[in-house]
Image (cartoon, coloured by chain):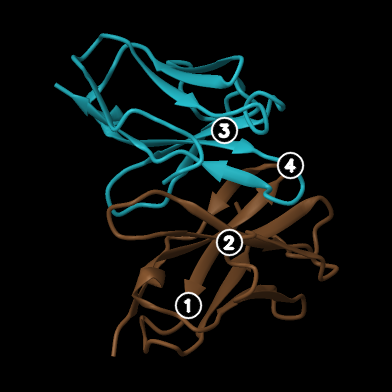
Chain colours: A cyan, B brown
């Protein structure tokens, strides 16, 4: 069982927007603004898409955005494209000993 | 562009020690401010952080694996390594090495599948 809770799957049609939630606790997401999101295509390594809750690394489309409220972080993908179909993982800092915890992952299907 | 490449045996027997090496190119494991980490992903499952090391040798391990994990660094070869002892079938996974900046993993290796089986 993963430390952070994500929906197993979400779906949307091309051009639509989808939001993936990531629920933690007051010891991880609720205490730090250090949530990151990773995209993983089948057979590939994860790719950093969002860090520090809402910042995008260079080269990541502005269709990807992140936010946080309380113990829950969210990733929103707007203007869905076929290439967005992948697994998405959230990750939060959880203190100096635990370091980070991951969510169980969400499979995004573009219909 | 920093690149990481995992190497090591793809098959390990139960109760033995899993050993993997990550070779870094396009950057230095001795760079200030960056940690070097191992993460694993069992087939069809999510990601699990294993631990990280700084070039000074300072380490931090996942408490759930700490008793079995050792991560070391060889700055002369620009490599860092993972040893996981007393493996069982539950340790079968794709193992990734990655660079850590603060709390995010910005560069990843391609991953290596390690199967624990007799």
- Mark closer to the observer (3, 1): 3
Side of B110 where A17 appears, left or right: left
Compute the Cα span from label 1 to label 4.
30 Å
Secondary structure under the numbered disc 4 in the rendered image: loop
Do tags 2 and 3 sit on the same chain? no
Which residue is label 2 attached to?
A: B64
Asked whether B106 or B20 is in front, the reply is B20
x 70%, y 73%: residue: B78
Which one is closest to the eye, mark 1 or mark 2?
2
Looking at the rendered structure, the secondary structure element under dot 1 is: strand
Evaluate whether label 4 is on the same chain as label 2: no
Q: Residues within 10 Å of mark 4 (few under 14, many from 20)?
A: few
* Front label number (4 vs 2): 2
Q: What's the mark number on residue A36?
A: 3
Distance CA(mark 3)–CA(mark 4) = 15 Å
- Mark 2 vs mark 3: in front: 2
- Report, in whole angstroms, how far the alpha carbon at label 4 lies from the one at label 2: 15 Å
Q: Does residue B37 show up?
A: no
The verdict on a common chain for dots 3 and 4 is yes
1 or 2: tag closer to the N-terminus: 1
Q: Which quadrant of the figure has residue B11? A: bottom left
Mark 1 to mark 2 CA distance (whole Å): 24 Å
Q: Residues within 10 Å of mark 3 (few under 14, many from 20)?
A: many
Residue B73: image quadrant is bottom right
- Label 2 neighbour load within 10 Å: few <14, some 14-19, many 20+: few
Chain ID of residue with mark 1: B
Q: Which residue is mark 1?
A: B7
Whichever of callouts 3 and 4 sits on the residue coming sooner in the sequence is 3
Residue that label 4 marks? A95
Query: Which secondary structure lies at badge 2?
Result: loop
């Amino acid at each position: 069982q993963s430390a952070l809770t994500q929906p197993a799957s979400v779906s949307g049609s091309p051009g639509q927007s989808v939001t993936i939630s990531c629920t933690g606790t007051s010891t991880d997401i609720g205490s730090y603004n250090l949530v990151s999101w990773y995209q993983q295509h089948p057979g590939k390594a994860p790719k950093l898409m969002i860090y520090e809750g809402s910042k995008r690394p260079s080269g990541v489309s502005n269709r990807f955005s992140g936010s946080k409220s309380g113990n829950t972080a969210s990733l929103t993908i707007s203007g869905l494209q076929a290439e967005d179909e992948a697994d998405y993982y959230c990750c939060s800092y959880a203190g100096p000993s635990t370091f980070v915890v991951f969510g169980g992952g969400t499979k995004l299907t573009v219909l | 562009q920093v690149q990481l490449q995992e190497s090591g045996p793809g098959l390990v027997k139960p109760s033995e020690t899993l050993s993997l090496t990550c070779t870094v190119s396009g950057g230095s494991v001795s760079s200030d401010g960056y940690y070097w980490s191992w993460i694993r992903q069992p087939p069809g499952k999510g990601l699990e952080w294993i631990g990280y090391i700084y070039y000074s040798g300072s380490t931090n391990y996942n408490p759930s694996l700490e008793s079995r994990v050792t991560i070391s660094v060889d700055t002369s070869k620009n490599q860092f390594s993972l040893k996981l002892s007393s493996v069982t079938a539950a340790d079968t996974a794709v193992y990734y090495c990655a660079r850590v900046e603060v709390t995010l993993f910005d560069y990843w290796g391609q991953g290596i599948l390690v199967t624990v089986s007799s």
